Image (tube, helix red, strand yellow):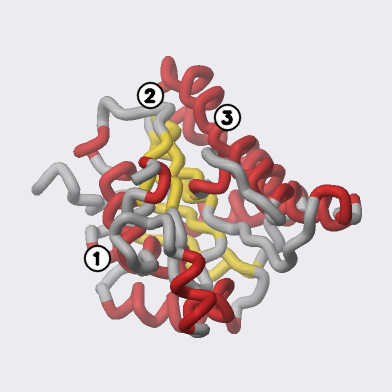
Amino acid sequence: MTVFDLTGRKAFITGASRGIGREIAVAMAQAGADVALVARTAEGLAATEHAVLACGREAFVIPADVTDQDAVAVAAAGAIDRLGHVDIVVNNAGGSNFIAAVMDLRMSGWDKLLRLNLTSAVYVCQAFGQHLIERGQGSVINVASVAGLISSPFLAPYGAAKAGLISLTKTLAVEWAPHGIRVNALCPGWTATDLNRNLWEDEAASKATIANVPMRRWGRPEEMAGPAVFLASDAASYITGQALVIDGGQTTGG
């Protein structure tokens, strides 16, 4: 057994139907974990479920809207019942489907993105908190963004939500440390997913987007999976309250 081994661990992963969430789910299964996969529809989770099963691990598909607190509570209870317990919680659901200057923002859009990118994580953490505390162990991984660390012109709701998620991560890390629970965040930079396909498939837009990334390329979803496995594993047993940045050097100012 290595310090990165997740054999016997049980993970609950939101936003697991595609992109970073799918890669994290598959990587954790490859490391030995059984996983509860959460997204809005079961159909969207089929590919992830197949990939997890191919690793010889259990995949429990849970269709749920993470912006609905009652749905999250039901999903959490179902995961615990099916898997027996949960050790790893990954709040990956999120995103932004519009751009707008702050002065042009509709408050309905602001509220929607805050609920999806921040409030949903609160729902999930509250739903699992007592279970993790009673077990005296656990690793919570909140997928934030470099948008929560630097300015985010025309993406203010998304950036503000991710900054809030990083703050929530630090606060929960302190509140739950006495109970043996670690809470950390991943902060991906520009990562080529379906959500921003319009940017990375357009040569000019792609080049402009990553102009301030020293590595001069987009991140790949699978490059976020290894760090997630690390934070979930015993290799990170003394790490909590941290925001692990995976951005090709974007936030270094290089």
Q: Secondary structure at mark 3?
A: helix
Do labels 3 and 1 touch, CB within 8 Å? no
Does 119 appear above or below 181? below
Give the image quarter of residue 25: bottom left
Instruction: Pinpoint residue 108: horizontal percent, then vertical percent.
Output: 89, 55
Instruction: Pinpoint residue 21: horizontal percent, then vertical percent.
Output: 47, 64
Sooner in the amino-acid sequence: mark 3 or mark 2: 3
Judge left or right: residue 234 versus residue 189. Answer: left
Q: Which residue is mark 1?
A: 30
| Residue at image coords 50%, 26% | 170
Q: Which residue is mark 3?
A: 167
Does 94 appear above or below 138? below
Question: Please, what is the three-letter code of the amino acid marked with disc 1?
Answer: Gln
Sooner in the amino-acid sequence: mark 2 or mark 1: 1
Label 2 environment density (alpha carbons within 10 Å; few <14, some 14–19, many ≥20) = some
Judge left or right: residue 137 versus residue 65. Answer: left
Q: Which residue is mark 2?
A: 180
| Residue at image coords 71%, 62% | 65
Of the residues tagged 3 and 2, which is closer to the observer? Answer: 3
| Residue at image coords 56%, 63% | 15
Give the image quarter of residue 125: top right
Q: Secondary structure at mark 2?
A: loop
Q: Secondary structure at mark 1?
A: helix
Question: Please, what is the three-letter code of the amino acid marked with disc 2?
Answer: Gly
Q: What distance separates the C-alpha of mark 3 from that of mark 1?
A: 30 Å
